[in-house]
Amino acid sequence: MIQHIDVHAVLQESVSGVYADLVTRPTGRVVRERIERAMATTQDPVTVARIDFTGVGCIDYSCADEIVAKLLRDRRAVVVLSGISDGHREAIEPVLAGHGLAALIERPDGGGELEALGAPEAAAALLHDLVARRLAVRTSAGTIALTLA
Amino acid sequence: MTRLVDVPAQFDDRTFEQFAGAYAAAARDGERLLFDAHATEWASPYGLVGLLAAGQAARATGSAELPLLTAPTHTEVLTYWTRAGFFREAAELFEIHGKLPRVKPAEQSDVLLPVTPVRAAEDVHAVVSNIQQRASAILASELALDPKATMGFAMALSEACQNIVEHAGTGGWVAVQAYHWRRKLARRVVVIAVADAGVGFRHSLEPTQSKRFGARWSDAAALEAALVQGISRFRDPGRGQGLAGIRRYLARWDGKIAIRSGTARIAIVPKWDDDVPLQDGLPAFPGAQVLIIIPEQGSTTP
């Protein structure tokens, strides 16, 4: 199954509701732990976790590391990031590259098309693995899309 | 006995060494300090937060009485320091002498962020939240930065503030201002200044790094390790991202960062500046002081 996690909502529950920015390591840690808890307590086994950043303002490097990099290292499920803005990418991409990691990004134009962000070798391996496990397919347009709805 | 510390007439990162020298000499015997700013004609955000850090240190290590501060006598200077939020913070650290004007800290001006205390992660949230709306207009319209740069600016600010929360062992201050930098660039700049009187980079990194450096371990080595090599005191491989991220952002927008801690100062110097990349043997000054400058885009030939 695909589990949808609304990061903005998790953030609002984690820190004072007036802030929309994912900044500071303690905040990142609390948000990640809540996401991990949500992934662990779902009744059906989670194959893909869609982590939705819609509504999140700024992400700093510390939060990108604490949330995205650590969720990817944990490998509980295939993590797909959605609602990612250019500003979010600016924080996430170098953090992933520094770890030699890659993450899947769902393109904002719909259609479930994916791209991999981060270290190039890890990105290629991630896409290859996803297709091999039949969680995604290569489309006629040459892109990658999730097979699960 | 009270020891005098003169605040330079033009108080910025360049004259900070003169101030730090006076502070180091005066603080040596633990007597009460008098910071004399009566003749100060101008202070940059770096000067203001640096003065607060000196007050913080004097309060923590000196006599039982609060250190004294003689406020500037120039009305314009007093008004600016008040608008910049300096006296609101200074009131807790100093016994202030001089008549202070009744003006509120700035809400609509080149003071993008008045002098703001940073003690915990919650304060960093507030700083980032406050800065984004005000900074975006300045960065895009006046500095000709791509609107996307605003997010990076908030990230850099967040990481600079987090250094206090994670490493200083005490609180500190941040201030952000835009101004026309006639002396150096003849163009507008946005300046972030962050200062604390905490343990400093050397002490923070010592448990994990001093053995590796051996006899070369010093304030300068600690600054180089943190800023150039991205080394953190934490063993977690994801640590050290903050300063590296700030450097990437500044490289993209031709900006500058300088960090002073203890007896050393390190700077990533862009082409438009002639600062010294690494200085050692400076007068001892507690904690860490960070300066970030982002210039108006276009030709930055001095």
Image (tube, rainbow, N blue to C red):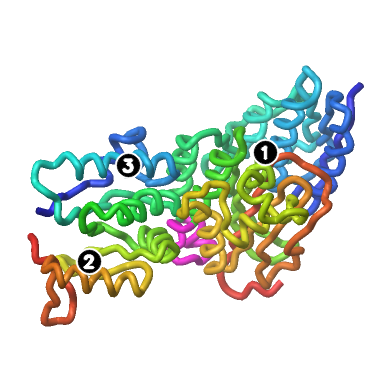
What is the crowding at mark 1: few (fewer than 14 residues within 10 Å), some, or many (at least 20)?
some
Q: Which residue lies furthest to the top in this view?
A: B64
| Main secondary structure along the magenta-highlighted residues | helix
Q: Are marks 3 and 2 on the same chain?
A: yes
Q: Do labels 1 and 3 share a chain?
A: no
| Residue at 50 percent of width and 56 percent of height | B241
Amino acid type, callout 2:
Arg
Q: Nearer the viewer, residue B276 or B29?
A: B29
Regarding mark 3 in the picture, which secondary structure is present there?
helix
| Residue at 86 percent of width and 35 percent of height | B5
User: Mark 1 and 3 residues: CB-CB less than 8 Å, in contact?
Assistant: no
Picture disc at residue A31:
3
Q: Which of marks 3 and 2 is in front?
A: 3
| Residue at 72 percent of width and 44 percent of height | B47
- State how far apart marks 1 and 3 are (Cα): 29 Å
Q: Name the residue under label 1.
A: B199
Q: Answer yes or no: is residue B13 visible.
A: no
What is the crowding at mark 3: few (fewer than 14 residues within 10 Å), some, or many (at least 20)?
many
Chain to which mark 2 belongs? A
Chain to which mark 3 belongs? A
User: What's the magenta region?
Assistant: B137-152
Q: Which residue lies furthest to the right in this view?
A: B1
Q: Name the residue under label 2.
A: A107
